[in-house]
Image (tube, coloured by chain):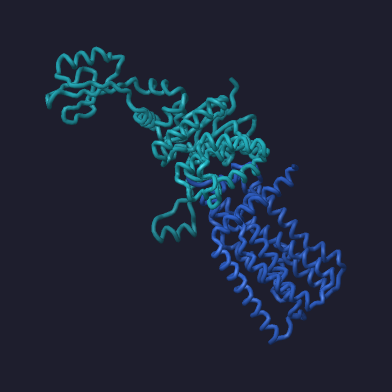
Chain colours: A cyan, B blue
């Protein structure tokens, strides 16, 4: 496979005006303004191949959006290089953005007061999509995303779920090769989330579109991404398949023991009790040191057990762990 | 399609979209346009009243000043109507709308210009056009005078567009627009509407050499009414406005590289 996007040693910092609080501070900043420099990206490098579907995750302020903005040609980095589709996004902006699509979950790319279809027509002109190709594409997207019912509704009157579907369709009208999705499921209900995920999946699988997805929703990642890049405080903390991420952080398992009645329970060796509520106990253990069958057998032999449940820790826990390690 | 014609086409489409959005709020548009007409109309009534009392200033008759006023007023109203996006640019940046424009394969100058076209400015334009028509009728204008008026309006429009572009460019560095630029734009309208000789030297200097409003309005008018200069000079002078606009766009493209986006 050939690499489609190569990111090397990106760094970007912002100047933030420091302002004292209250009236004195506000007036003071008029006379003399002090700036602090905040590094949004310190050293970010990764490579994406055509057809990748990559999750890009990290806590607020980690540099996710800054990366997406640099990769989509909005921001110019302080240093570092990007070679995307054979171009430099911020130097060849107009040629480059013709071949990418971007969806920001927080704001719409469409014209607020106009019917959806009018926005589509305008985008057709802006991207110079030939009429026949536009009609075919628009028809396909309308069917796939079920937009028919509100194509003639002004964007401001759409529900959030409807608007997100339209925004996704709008970003795809010019058949981009790379799609950036910045928190596309934020604020959506469960049904809309599922629908959106399916669409993204099919775009990636059937049309081979490379997708870069930033999100706080770990379900998005688990449902869609084979590869996850974790960023924290401007640096890449981990980059690899989701399973590898799980394994590398903690080979931890969680065991929930439900006891008969409110009896005493002492944890077996090499396990820790995370918490206890009534007759339920949550244990944490390393399956290599303490093989699961032996642990269960041991607990069942010494306790009156009603039920047992073995789980992998949720991905949120893994990520939280990674952030803490990254900071220390 | 060639890129330039295609760019013009997209500009027109964006402008039309903007107008369609505004027509969703029709009553508000009508009232604003009428308000503009009324306010600027009263302003001219005050000028006329002064002339009836004092006769002339520096040898300029009322309809000659009305010609100048009409040219500058309509040039400014056109610039405000067509380039309002630059005037509102700090709001465009703060709302994050500029990110959206950068994501599109078109020049940012064209997109910002088309971002907010204010049809209600037609109120001011109509008022200035009325005054200009009245002046032309009283001046017994020849075809040459009409051509001069058209060139002067376009030149003045370009100069004000250039000022809006420069004002917006400052926003790349400060996020908030410095009010100081408004002194030049609004002040420029007032100043350029009268013969430049009534002002102190530093003001004449500013609007001749820094902002070429004199070349697009006062100087051609003086050639027309006083010096009876050759028509070619009268028609060439307003081109300074176009040069000013082009220079502003070059500075804009430089400033754009300093754009720092906002929020997440």
Describe residue A308's horizontal placement relative to residue A135 as left or right. left
Q: Residue at x 49, y 45 (%)?
A: A107
Depicted A111 relative to depicted A274: above or below = below
Describe residue B243's horizontal placement relative to residue A316 as left or right. right
Query: Whole-percent x and y of residue B204?
Result: 71, 69
The answer to whether residue B260 shows anywhere in this view is no
Quarter of the image that includes the C terminus of chain A = top left
Q: Which residue is the extreme one toward the right?
A: B230
Query: Whole-percent x and y of residue B122?
Result: 64, 65
Depicted A7 relative to depicted B251: above or below = above
The answer to whether residue A227 shows anywhere in this view is yes
Depicted B23 relative to depicted A77: above or below = below
Comparing B245 with A203, the one in front is A203
Query: Whole-percent x and y of residue B124?
Result: 64, 68
Describe residue A289's horizontal placement relative to residue A147 as left or right. left
Quarter of the image that includes the N terminus of chain A = top right
Query: Whole-percent x and y of residue A260?
Result: 14, 23
Comparing B176 with B264, the one in front is B264
Q: Which residue is the extreme one toward the front?
A: A149
Q: Residue at x 76, y 79 (%)?
A: B60
Q: Residue at x 26, y 13 (%)?
A: A293
Number of numbered labels in the structure image: 0
Determine which quarter of the picture holds residue A127: top right
Q: Residue at x 65, y 35 (%)?
A: A133
Comparing A179 with A86, the one in front is A179
Determine which quarter of the picture holds residue A194: top left
């Amino acid at each position: 496979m050939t690499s489609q996007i190569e990111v090397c040693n990106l760094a970007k910092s912002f100047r933030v005006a420091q302002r004292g609080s209250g009236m004195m501070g506000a007036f003071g900043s008029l006379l003399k303004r002090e700036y602090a420099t905040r590094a949004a990206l310190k050293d970010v490098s990764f490579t994406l191949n055509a057809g990748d579907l990559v999750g890009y995750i990290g806590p607020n302020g980690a540099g996710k959006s800054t990366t997406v903005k640099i990769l989509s040609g909005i921001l110019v980095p302080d240093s570092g290089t990007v070679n995307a589709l054979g171009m430099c996004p911020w130097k060849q902006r107009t040629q480059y953005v013709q071949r990418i699509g971007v969806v920001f979950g927080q704001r719409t790319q469409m014209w607020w007061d106009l019917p959806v279809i009018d926005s589509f027509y305008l985008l057709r002109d802006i991207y110079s999509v030939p009429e026949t190709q536009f009609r075919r594409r628009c028809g396909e997207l309308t069917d796939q995303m079920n937009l028919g019912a509100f194509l003639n509704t002004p964007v401001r009157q759409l529900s959030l779920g409807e608007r997100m579907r339209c925004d996704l369709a709008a970003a795809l009208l010019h058949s981009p090769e790379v799609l950036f999705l910045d928190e596309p499921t934020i604020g959506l209900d469960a049904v809309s989330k599922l629908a959106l995920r399916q669409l993204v999946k099919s775009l990636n699988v059937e049309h081979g579109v490379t997708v870069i997805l930033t999100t706080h929703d770990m379900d998005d990642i688990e449902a869609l991404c084979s590869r996850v890049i974790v960023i924290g405080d401007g640096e890449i903390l981990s980059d690899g398949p989701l399973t590898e991420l799980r394994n590398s952080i903690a080979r931890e398992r969680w065991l929930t023991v439900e006891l008969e009645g409110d009896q005493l329970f002492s944890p077996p060796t090499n396990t820790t009790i995370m918490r206890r509520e009534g007759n339920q106990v949550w244990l944490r253990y390393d399956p290599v040191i303490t093989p699961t069958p032996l642990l269960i057998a041991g607990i069942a032999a010494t306790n009156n057990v009603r039920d047992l449940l073995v789980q992998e820790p949720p991905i949120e826990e893994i990520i939280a762990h990674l952030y803490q390690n990254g900071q220390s | 399609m060639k890129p330039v014609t295609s760019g013009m086409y997209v500009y027109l489409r964006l402008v039309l979209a903007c107008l369609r959005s505004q027509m969703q709020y029709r009553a508000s548009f009508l009232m604003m346009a009428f308000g503009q007409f009324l306010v600027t109309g009263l302003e001219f009534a005050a000028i006329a009243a002064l002339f009836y009392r004092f006769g002339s200033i520096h040898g300029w008759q009322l309809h000659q000043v009305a010609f100048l006023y009409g040219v500058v007023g309509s040039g400014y109203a056109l610039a405000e109507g067509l380039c309002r996006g630059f005037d509102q640019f700090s709001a465009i940046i703060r709302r994050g709308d500029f990110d959206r424009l950068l994501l599109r394969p078109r020049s940012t100058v064209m997109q910002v210009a088309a971002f907010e076209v204010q049809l209600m400015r037609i109120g001011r334009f109509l008022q200035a056009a009325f005054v200009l028509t009245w002046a032309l009728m009283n001046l017994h204008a020849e075809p040459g005078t009409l051509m001069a008026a058209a060139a002067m309006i376009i030149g003045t429009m370009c100069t004000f567009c250039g000022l809006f572009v420069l004002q917006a460019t400052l926003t790349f560095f400060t996020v908030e627009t410095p009010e100081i630029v408004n002194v030049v734009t609004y002040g420029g309208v007032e100043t350029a509407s009268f013969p430049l000789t009534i002002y102190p030297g530093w003001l004449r200097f500013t609007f001749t050499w820094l902002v070429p409003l004199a070349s697009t309005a006062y100087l051609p008018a003086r050639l027309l009414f006083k010096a009876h200069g050759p028509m070619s000079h009268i028609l060439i002078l307003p081109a300074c406005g176009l040069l000013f606009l082009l220079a502003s766009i070059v500075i804009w493209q430089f400033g754009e590289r300093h754009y720092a986006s906002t929020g997440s």
